[in-house]
Image (spheres, helix red, strand yellow):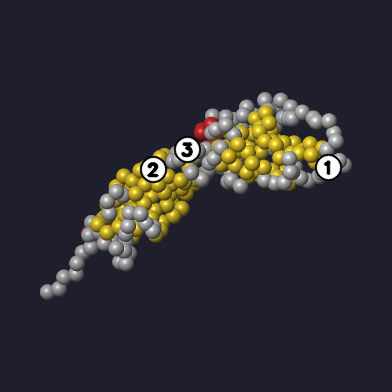
Amino acid sequence: RRSTTNALPTELSHVKSLFGQELPPGVQPRMVSSRTFDLDYALESAGQWGVSRVELWGTRDGGKTWRNYALDDDNRSPLRVRVEGEGLYGFRLVARSSGVLAASGPEPGDPPDLWVAVDMEVPRAELLSVQQGMGNGSDHLVIRWRVEDSNLESQPIALFYSSRAGGPWSAVATGLENTGEYAWRLDRHLPDRFFLRLEARDLAGNVASCQTPQPIVLNRAQPTVR
Protein backbone atom coordinates (compact mmCIF):
# COMPACT_ATOMS: atom_id res chain seq x y z
CA ARG A 1 0.00 0.00 0.00
CA ARG A 2 1.02 3.61 -0.47
CA SER A 3 -0.39 6.48 1.50
CA THR A 4 -0.16 10.27 1.36
CA THR A 5 -1.92 13.38 2.61
CA ASN A 6 -2.43 16.61 0.69
CA ALA A 7 -0.46 18.63 3.25
CA LEU A 8 3.10 19.90 2.99
CA PRO A 9 6.20 18.46 4.67
CA THR A 10 7.92 20.54 7.32
CA GLU A 11 11.41 20.77 8.76
CA LEU A 12 12.13 18.20 11.45
CA SER A 13 13.44 20.75 13.98
CA HIS A 14 10.14 22.65 13.92
CA VAL A 15 8.09 19.60 14.82
CA LYS A 16 10.46 18.63 17.64
CA SER A 17 10.12 22.06 19.22
CA LEU A 18 6.35 22.08 18.78
CA PHE A 19 5.43 18.64 20.03
CA GLY A 20 8.53 17.56 21.96
CA GLN A 21 8.71 14.14 20.31
CA GLU A 22 11.77 12.64 18.68
CA LEU A 23 11.57 11.37 15.10
CA PRO A 24 13.75 8.91 13.21
CA PRO A 25 16.50 10.56 11.15
CA GLY A 26 15.27 11.91 7.82
CA VAL A 27 11.56 11.64 8.66
CA GLN A 28 9.50 14.64 7.59
CA PRO A 29 5.88 14.63 8.76
CA ARG A 30 2.99 16.04 6.80
CA MET A 31 1.37 19.13 8.30
CA VAL A 32 -2.40 19.62 8.64
CA SER A 33 -4.42 22.31 10.43
CA SER A 34 -7.50 20.25 11.31
CA ARG A 35 -8.38 17.22 13.43
CA THR A 36 -10.16 15.82 10.36
CA PHE A 37 -8.33 15.22 7.09
CA ASP A 38 -8.33 12.90 4.07
CA LEU A 39 -5.60 10.35 3.50
CA ASP A 40 -5.07 9.16 -0.08
CA TYR A 41 -3.95 5.60 -0.64
CA ALA A 42 -3.45 3.12 -3.48
CA LEU A 43 -3.95 -0.65 -3.33
CA GLU A 44 -0.88 -2.12 -5.00
CA SER A 45 -2.17 -5.70 -4.94
CA ALA A 46 -5.56 -7.25 -4.13
CA GLY A 47 -4.12 -10.72 -3.50
CA GLN A 48 -5.77 -14.03 -4.41
CA TRP A 49 -9.03 -13.41 -2.52
CA GLY A 50 -9.43 -9.69 -2.97
CA VAL A 51 -9.60 -6.98 -0.30
CA SER A 52 -12.47 -6.80 2.15
CA ARG A 53 -11.49 -3.55 3.85
CA VAL A 54 -8.64 -1.15 4.52
CA GLU A 55 -7.80 -0.19 8.10
CA LEU A 56 -5.77 2.75 9.34
CA TRP A 57 -3.80 2.20 12.53
CA GLY A 58 -2.16 5.02 14.45
CA THR A 59 0.39 5.57 17.19
CA ARG A 60 1.28 8.56 19.35
CA ASP A 61 4.37 7.05 20.98
CA GLY A 62 6.51 6.18 17.97
CA GLY A 63 5.09 2.69 17.46
CA LYS A 64 5.12 1.35 21.03
CA THR A 65 1.32 1.10 21.04
CA TRP A 66 -1.22 1.15 18.21
CA ARG A 67 -4.97 1.65 17.86
CA ASN A 68 -7.43 1.63 14.98
CA TYR A 69 -8.27 5.12 13.72
CA ALA A 70 -10.36 4.49 10.60
CA LEU A 71 -11.98 1.77 8.50
CA ASP A 72 -12.69 1.93 4.76
CA ASP A 73 -15.20 -0.70 3.61
CA ASP A 74 -15.42 0.43 -0.02
CA ASN A 75 -11.64 0.27 -0.52
CA ARG A 76 -11.66 3.52 -2.45
CA SER A 77 -9.36 6.40 -1.69
CA PRO A 78 -9.44 8.77 0.12
CA LEU A 79 -9.87 7.62 3.70
CA ARG A 80 -11.38 10.16 6.11
CA VAL A 81 -9.38 10.39 9.36
CA ARG A 82 -10.29 12.10 12.62
CA VAL A 83 -7.77 12.39 15.48
CA GLU A 84 -8.07 13.50 19.11
CA GLY A 85 -6.31 16.84 18.83
CA GLU A 86 -3.02 18.56 18.14
CA GLY A 87 0.13 16.48 18.15
CA LEU A 88 2.27 14.08 16.19
CA TYR A 89 0.75 10.87 14.80
CA GLY A 90 2.29 7.87 13.08
CA PHE A 91 0.10 5.77 10.75
CA ARG A 92 0.13 2.37 9.05
CA LEU A 93 -2.41 1.03 6.56
CA VAL A 94 -3.52 -2.60 6.74
CA ALA A 95 -5.47 -4.31 3.92
CA ARG A 96 -7.67 -7.23 5.02
CA SER A 97 -8.16 -10.13 2.61
CA SER A 98 -11.64 -11.49 1.88
CA GLY A 99 -12.43 -14.92 3.31
CA VAL A 100 -9.35 -14.99 5.52
CA LEU A 101 -9.31 -14.95 9.31
CA ALA A 102 -8.70 -11.39 10.46
CA ALA A 103 -5.15 -10.65 11.50
CA SER A 104 -4.08 -8.22 14.21
CA GLY A 105 -2.89 -4.70 13.56
CA PRO A 106 0.71 -3.49 13.75
CA GLU A 107 2.86 -5.01 16.45
CA PRO A 108 4.47 -2.94 19.22
CA GLY A 109 7.73 -1.61 17.84
CA ASP A 110 6.59 -1.52 14.20
CA PRO A 111 7.57 1.82 12.62
CA PRO A 112 4.89 4.09 11.09
CA ASP A 113 4.66 4.35 7.31
CA LEU A 114 3.46 7.95 7.48
CA TRP A 115 3.84 10.76 10.03
CA VAL A 116 1.27 13.55 10.35
CA ALA A 117 1.56 16.61 12.60
CA VAL A 118 -1.71 18.33 13.51
CA ASP A 119 -1.17 22.02 14.26
CA MET A 120 -4.30 24.15 14.77
CA GLU A 121 -2.63 27.12 16.46
CA VAL A 122 -2.82 30.36 14.47
CA PRO A 123 0.38 32.46 14.47
CA ARG A 124 0.45 35.52 16.72
CA ALA A 125 0.67 38.61 14.52
CA GLU A 126 0.83 42.32 15.35
CA LEU A 127 1.49 45.46 13.30
CA LEU A 128 3.82 47.59 15.39
CA SER A 129 4.19 50.75 13.32
CA VAL A 130 3.78 52.22 9.86
CA GLN A 131 5.91 55.31 9.25
CA GLN A 132 6.60 57.38 6.19
CA GLY A 133 10.20 58.38 5.70
CA MET A 134 11.51 61.94 5.84
CA GLY A 135 13.42 63.96 3.28
CA ASN A 136 14.95 61.74 0.62
CA GLY A 137 13.19 58.77 2.21
CA SER A 138 9.71 60.26 1.95
CA ASP A 139 8.90 57.95 -0.97
CA HIS A 140 9.12 54.90 1.35
CA LEU A 141 6.76 53.55 3.98
CA VAL A 142 8.52 51.56 6.70
CA ILE A 143 6.27 48.78 8.03
CA ARG A 144 7.21 47.00 11.26
CA TRP A 145 5.53 43.91 12.73
CA ARG A 146 5.87 41.09 15.23
CA VAL A 147 4.91 37.52 14.24
CA GLU A 148 5.51 34.52 16.51
CA ASP A 149 4.89 30.83 15.90
CA SER A 150 7.00 27.71 16.41
CA ASN A 151 6.03 26.37 12.99
CA LEU A 152 6.15 29.26 10.51
CA GLU A 153 6.84 28.87 6.82
CA SER A 154 10.28 30.03 5.70
CA GLN A 155 8.72 33.09 4.00
CA PRO A 156 5.43 33.50 5.84
CA ILE A 157 4.66 37.23 5.56
CA ALA A 158 2.39 38.99 3.08
CA LEU A 159 1.39 42.68 3.05
CA PHE A 160 -1.66 44.24 1.39
CA TYR A 161 -3.35 47.64 1.10
CA SER A 162 -6.86 48.86 0.35
CA SER A 163 -8.70 52.18 0.30
CA ARG A 164 -11.46 50.45 2.33
CA ALA A 165 -11.21 48.71 5.68
CA GLY A 166 -13.02 45.66 4.31
CA GLY A 167 -11.05 45.41 1.08
CA PRO A 168 -10.69 44.36 -1.68
CA TRP A 169 -6.96 44.11 -1.00
CA SER A 170 -4.03 44.63 -3.36
CA ALA A 171 -0.64 43.07 -2.70
CA VAL A 172 2.25 45.17 -1.46
CA ALA A 173 4.62 42.22 -1.15
CA THR A 174 4.25 38.48 -0.56
CA GLY A 175 6.64 35.69 0.41
CA LEU A 176 8.60 37.88 2.83
CA GLU A 177 10.82 36.48 5.54
CA ASN A 178 9.81 37.22 9.11
CA THR A 179 12.41 39.97 9.60
CA GLY A 180 9.96 42.30 11.35
CA GLU A 181 10.44 45.17 8.92
CA TYR A 182 9.79 46.06 5.28
CA ALA A 183 10.45 49.32 3.40
CA TRP A 184 7.78 49.83 0.77
CA ARG A 185 8.58 52.21 -2.06
CA LEU A 186 5.42 54.21 -2.63
CA ASP A 187 3.80 54.42 -6.03
CA ARG A 188 2.38 57.73 -7.26
CA HIS A 189 -0.87 55.96 -8.16
CA LEU A 190 -1.55 55.03 -4.53
CA PRO A 191 -4.52 56.73 -2.85
CA ASP A 192 -3.70 59.38 -0.27
CA ARG A 193 -5.49 57.35 2.41
CA PHE A 194 -5.45 53.55 2.68
CA PHE A 195 -5.49 50.66 5.15
CA LEU A 196 -2.62 48.20 5.53
CA ARG A 197 -3.05 44.47 6.21
CA LEU A 198 -0.53 41.83 7.29
CA GLU A 199 -0.94 38.06 6.94
CA ALA A 200 1.28 35.35 8.42
CA ARG A 201 1.07 31.66 7.47
CA ASP A 202 2.46 28.57 9.18
CA LEU A 203 3.39 25.22 7.63
CA ALA A 204 0.04 23.65 8.50
CA GLY A 205 -1.85 26.38 6.59
CA ASN A 206 -3.04 28.42 9.58
CA VAL A 207 -3.20 32.11 8.67
CA ALA A 208 -3.18 35.07 11.06
CA SER A 209 -4.10 38.56 9.88
CA CYS A 210 -4.16 42.06 11.32
CA GLN A 211 -4.60 45.52 9.85
CA THR A 212 -4.34 49.17 10.74
CA PRO A 213 -7.49 50.33 12.59
CA GLN A 214 -7.31 53.75 10.95
CA PRO A 215 -6.28 54.65 7.41
CA ILE A 216 -2.72 55.69 6.75
CA VAL A 217 -2.56 59.25 5.42
CA LEU A 218 0.35 59.94 3.10
CA ASN A 219 2.23 63.22 3.30
CA ARG A 220 2.76 64.12 -0.32
CA ALA A 221 5.04 67.08 -0.90
CA GLN A 222 3.28 69.59 -3.15
CA PRO A 223 5.24 71.15 -6.01
CA THR A 224 6.03 74.85 -5.69
CA VAL A 225 6.71 77.51 -8.29
CA ARG A 226 8.09 81.02 -8.06
Work out whether residue 12 can be spotted.
Answer: no
Q: Which of the two marks, 2 or 1, is nearer to us in this view?
A: 1
Q: Amino acid at mark 1?
A: Gly
Q: Is residue 33 above or below residue 131?
A: above
User: Residue 218 appears at what percent x and percent y?
Assistant: 25, 59
- C-alpha separation, residue under disc 3 versus residue under disc 1: 42 Å
- The crowding category of the residue bearing disc 1, from other C-alpha atoms within 10 Å (few below 14, some 14 to 19, many at least 20), is few
Circles 3, 2 touching at the beta carbon (< 8 Å): no
* Left/right of residue 205 with respect to residue 170 in the rendered view: right
Q: Secondary structure beneath disc 1?
A: loop
Question: Among all residues in the image, which is located at the extreme bottom?
Answer: 226
Q: Secondary structure beneath disc 3?
A: loop
Q: Is residue 165 above or below residue 125?
A: below
Residue bearing the label numbered 1: 50
Q: Which of the two marks, 3 or 1, is nearer to us in this view?
A: 1
Question: Among all residues in the image, which is located at the extreme right?
Answer: 48
Residue at x 86% of width, y 41% of height: 49
Q: Which of the two marks, 3 or 2, is nearer to us in this view?
A: 3
- Quarter of the image with the N terminus in it: top right
Give whichever of 64, 40 is nearer the camera: 40
Q: Amino acid at mark 3?
A: Glu
Q: Earlier in the sequence, mark 3 or mark 1?
A: 1
Residue at x 15% of width, y 73% of height: 225
Q: Earlier in the sequence, mark 2 or mark 1?
A: 1
Q: Amino acid at mark 2?
A: Ala
Residue bearing the label numbered 2: 125
Residue bearing the label numbered 3: 121
Residue 138 location, quadrant: bottom left
- C-alpha separation, residue under disc 3 versus residue under disc 2: 12 Å
Give whichever of 137, 68 is nearer the camera: 68
